[in-house]
Amino acid sequence: EAEAVRERNLYRGSGESNTTHYGQDLGADRIQRIWASLKQSAELDARRASVRAFNAGSRGVKRGLAMTPVKFGISFTATWLNQAGALVLVYRDGSVHVNHGGTEMGQGLYTKLRGVAMRELGVREESVRMMKTQTDKVPNTSATAASSGSDLNGQAVRAACETLRERL
């Protein structure tokens, strides 16, 4: 089976820690334990037997089943790129303007950051206005990439709101 080849190619539990090319320490045998746990919880052997039985009885339609490890680094390996900023303004009428350095490209960034501001300031959705990203408001922004836009900018908005709460 293909999974056997994939399993042989996992980071090896040599009794020493495994480190990825971008410096993440995986521990000695963590990947093998996760792989075995997933095979068991997914009932891979039983499901594979079911697929084989179906395929044996079907000439035209076939089924397949695969278990594939994926290594996907989150964030930037150059740590100085893992930065974000936010400018949050609270007005006398209770309205809030949120400026941040992220780029909305269909991932729901504005919605997520609005939710952060709402939670941190205890205001309703209609009170929070998301401003378009402008470098005169939030300079030196990192790229919205590497699956980090929501995390980095969300923490920047949270920190700005926290500072405002302390001052109010």
Image (cartoon, grey):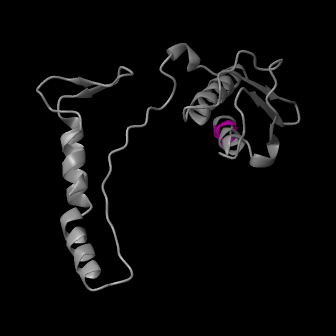
- Magenta stretch, overall SS: helix
- Of all residues, the one furthest to the left in this rendering is 15
Vertical relation: 38 (above or below) 164: below
Q: Residue at x 35, y 22 (%)?
A: 21
Region of the chain picked out in magenta, as a range: 115-119
Viewer-nearest residue: 134 or 65: 65
Vertical relation: 96 (above or below) 42: above
Viewer-nearest residue: 109 or 168: 109
Image x and y of residue 125, in percent: 75, 47
- Of all residues, the one furthest to the front in this rendering is 59
Vertical relation: 143 (above or below) 6: above
Image x and y of residue 61, in percent: 38, 80
User: Residue 1 magenta-drawn?
Assistant: no
- Residue 104 figure quarter: top right
Viewer-nearest residue: 124 or 133: 133
User: Residue 118 magenta-drawn?
Assistant: yes
Q: Quadrant of the N terminus?
A: bottom left
- Residue 161 figure quarter: top right
Q: Residue at x 88, y 36 (%)?
A: 93
